[in-house]
Image: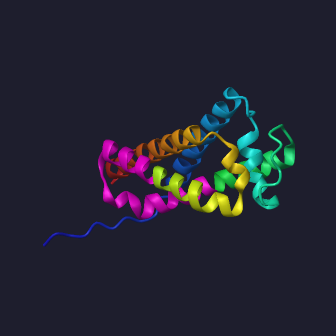
Amino acid sequence: MAQRETRRFDPRTLVVGFIAGMAFGMMEMVIEALIGMGFWAPLRFIASVFTLGRDTDPSFSLMPVFVGLMGHMMNSVIFSIVFGLFVSRLASGVVGLAILGMVYAAAIFVVMWYVVLPLIDPAMLLVNAGGFFASHLLYGLVLGVGIALVRQRSSVAA
């Protein structure tokens, strides 16, 4: 009889989510700077969720940048927990989890871009859609590879 594999939450998933979120954030900020929107624009636009998208000033301002960073990192870690506990069961190995992570992140992009952001933070729609999608793919890649490495280290330690 085949045993069903059960996975418990590994706290290292939080670190993986944090690293994946940082990779996403830095890529998005560089893209927005290169296209002329401004390096701080993504964080300012995230913070505009509290003004329903009315704060679209892309320049640096400590409080909106801090709020945007906290919101972004919180979402990154929450999505990594969901991936680590549930979605990642659909694949194994580094390549499988990397691909699954990118598909997962692409799905997050679609839901955020077409459903969530228009409703709660329309300012985020000012970022470059292609760059935002590519940043999501990078998040998924780092997330999938990170979860695979956590699993490999867990199986070696066991």
Q: Is residue 59 left or right of residue 84?
A: right
The percent position of residue 142, horizontal first and vertical second, equals: 47, 42
Residue at figure coordinates x 63%, y 38% from the top left? 28
Quarter containing the C terminus: bottom left
Taking the magenta stretch, the answer to whether it contains residue 88 is: yes
Quadrant holding the N terminus: bottom left
* Image spot of residue 31 (x, y percent): 63, 32
Horizontally, is 120 left or right of 78 in the view? right
Residue under the point 68% across and 34% down? 32
- Residue drawn 31% across the image and 54% down it: 91
Q: Is residue 150 magenta?
A: no
Residue at horizontal 16 percent and vertical 69 percent from the top: 2
Rendered location of residue 88, percent (x, y): 38, 57
Please say whether residue 89 is visible from this viewpoint.
Answer: yes
Comparing 75 with 59, the one in front is 59
Does residue 116 appear to the left or right of 66 in the view shown?
A: left
Q: Compare residues 79 and 3 and report the one nearer the observer.
A: 79
Q: In this picture, is 7 found above or below 132?
A: below
Where does the image place residue 75, in percent across and percent down from the top left?
62, 57
Report the span colored magenta. 75-104
> Does 114 sit above or below residue 130?
below
Residue 41, relative to residue 70: is it above or below?
Answer: above
**Residue sitting at the far top:** 34
Examine the residues drawn in magenta and state their main secondary structure: helix
Tell me, yes or no, if residue 150 can be seen here: no
